[in-house]
Amino acid sequence: MTTDPAGMPADLLAHARAAKGFMPEDEGLLLHRVARERLPHGPVLEIGTYCGKSAIYLGAAAREVGGTVLTVDHHRGSEENQAGWEHHDTSLVVDDTGLMDSLPTFRATIAAAGLEEQVVAVVGRSTTVSGLWRTPVSMVFIDGGHAEVHARNDYTGWAPWLVTGGLLVIHDVFPDPADGGRPPYLVFLQALASGDFEEVEALGSVRVLRRVRGTAGDPVPWDPSLTAP
Ligand SMILES: C[S@@+](CC[C@H](N)C(=O)[O-])C[C@H]1O[C@@H](n2cnc3c(N)ncnc32)[C@H](O)[C@@H]1O
């Protein structure tokens, strides 16, 4: 199996490039690298599957080193995916209901990439699933709803299940408001301010933090007085 210079198996890089979605290649290769580091220590959990583009980068790591990637999404799209919004894709609308459904495209994408053994879809609302969740994870990748309530729920619902030394990876972190919305940046600030996490790497809008205090099952704090400038 050939591997490109950045370390991603060439066949899967081609699938990731072709997949529908919102994951630039340099950021995807970072996801792949950190997932490869963490998967030997437990499952990797993604919030925000969409059509599976980022899941291919994560699943490629699982194919290489073993382990499982879980990816959570209700597959009905975020606010910005709905009709009339910037990231709406009419091909994902189900004719008879008018609702969005990214699950069939995700399923076909992961099957074509040969990653069905590595990437497990969990279909449901993030808070519903995290409320029932009890399994330690080695890495959490937050790329779900970008409204503040969703970003906060994804952080407070899923980051607690990180083992000590586990990685919290956040997408669409924009310190400058001119570049994008505030909620993922606020999650990043909350994690740092808590003292439970330390930043280890940044690339584009991706931030990688390590859990340095607490272990799986311990809650993470949220300080309502801390806002994103
Ligand atoms: C930015 S997209 C994910 C992009 C994807 N990671 C990629 O590589 O293309 C965000 C996804 O989060 C999902 N989502 C938004 N809010 C959610 C919630 N509360 N629970 C579950 N999924 C949610 C949407 O359905 C959407 O598919």
Image (tube, helix red, strand yellow):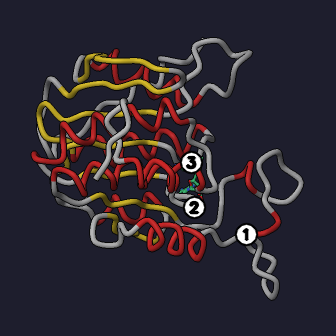
Task: Kindly indicate whether the residue at mark 3 contacts the one at mark 1 (C-beta within 8 angstroms).
Answer: no
For image coordinates 24% across by 54% down, the residue present is 62
**In this view, the mark in front (1 or 3):** 3
Residue 85, relative to residue 69: is it above or below? above
Q: Position of residue 114 (x, y in %)?
A: 38, 69
Of callouts 1 and 3, the N-terminal one:
3
Number of dots carrying numbers? 3
| Residue at image mark 3 | 17
Numbered label attached to residue 51:
2
Badge 1: residue crowd in 10 Å (few <14, some 14–19, many ≥20):
many
Residue type, label 1 = Leu
Measured in 3D between alpha carbons, the distance from the residue under mark 1 to the one under mark 3, in whole angstroms, is 19 Å
Residue type, label 2 = Cys
The quadrant the C terminus occupies is: top right
Task: Kindly indicate whether the residue at mark 2 contacts the one at mark 3 (C-beta within 8 angstroms).
Answer: no
| Residue at image mark 1 | 92
Task: Kindly indicate whether the residue at mark 2 contacts the one at mark 1 (C-beta within 8 angstroms).
Answer: yes
Q: Position of residue 24 (x, y in %)?
A: 57, 36
